[in-house]
Image (cartoon, rainbow, N blue to C red):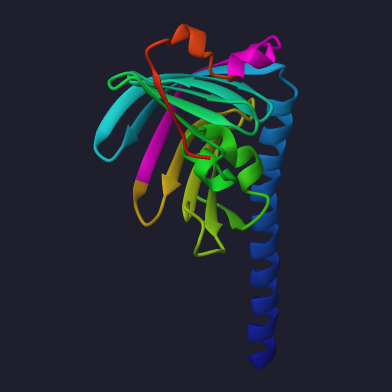
Amino acid sequence: MTRLYCLLGTVLITLSSYAAWDAKSVLDKAATEYRKCASVNVTFEVAASGDTDNGTILLQGNKFYTQLSNTTTWFDGKTMWSYVKDNEEVNVTEPKSTQLAKMNPYAFIDMYKKGYDVAFGSNTKAYYEVVLTSTNAKNSIQKAIIRINRMNYQPMYIMMGGSKADIEIKVTSYKKGKKQADSTFRFNKNRYPNAEIIDLR
């Protein structure tokens, strides 16, 4: 009987290790497909802290340009500018990777490679559900759920948060595009002459 339990334990450990590897391979494939594109334009619905909004994000490598109803954000790979329409302020920062993840829903493309356990959630015929669980209590994102389309490996749904959903994003369209100029991902103060620039770097 003891031998049977040992054998069963070995099988379960082997299966769980395979599942973790396979879930990671789904994200590896999604990252590879994303990097094949010169740029990607995504429209999405976002819910956070009881509020909902619609937005767009233009992605190119590790750069992005995001528009929501009251906020526009540019990130050139190092510096981020966030313009708030209501008060005409621009906050300038150099965010860390986990901070970026809450601004850029596609940050998981790199985030999952370090500091997270990767496993399958509830897969369906339409998508793979991959769950990221932080291995570092200091990470601002303790848990993430990503649903990846089985056909084209494009993200369909992203949740980032802790014990409950802090931010939920539903992708409504995903379009591949041509390479954009670097200036697309930088704030142009000439277009916002009345904006107050607050440098938080």
Q: Is residue 136 magenta?
A: no
Label the magenta part by its dominant secondary structure.
strand
Image location of residue 22, percent across then percent down: 69, 50
Image location of residue 194, percent across then percent down: 37, 12
Give whichever of 183, 29 is nearer the camera. Answer: 183
Residue at 33 percent of width and 20 percent of height: 70
Count every numbered label the image shows and give the total.
0
Give whichever of 73, 121 is nearer the camera. Answer: 73
Q: Is residue 145 left or right of residue 85?
A: right
Can I make out residue 170 in this image?
Answer: yes
Can I make out residue 122 in this image?
Answer: no
Q: Is residue 194 left or right of residue 21?
A: left
Give whichever of 133, 12 is nearer the camera. Answer: 133
Q: Which residues are magenta?
A: 166-185
Q: Is residue 73 left or right of residue 175?
A: left
Residue at 39 percent of width and 37 percent of height: 168
Location of residue 11 with respect to 122 vertically, above or below: below
Residue at 43 percent of width and 22 percent of height: 44
Q: Is residue 183 magenta?
A: yes
Image location of residue 88, percent across then percent down: 34, 19
Res 128 → quadrant: top right
Q: Farthest residue in the left direction? A: 50
Quarter that holds the N terminus: bottom right
Image location of residue 120, percent across then percent down: 56, 51
Location of residue 95 with respect to 138 vertically, above or below: above
Q: Is residue 134 left or right of residue 51?
A: right
Residue at 68 percent of width and 63 percent of height: 17
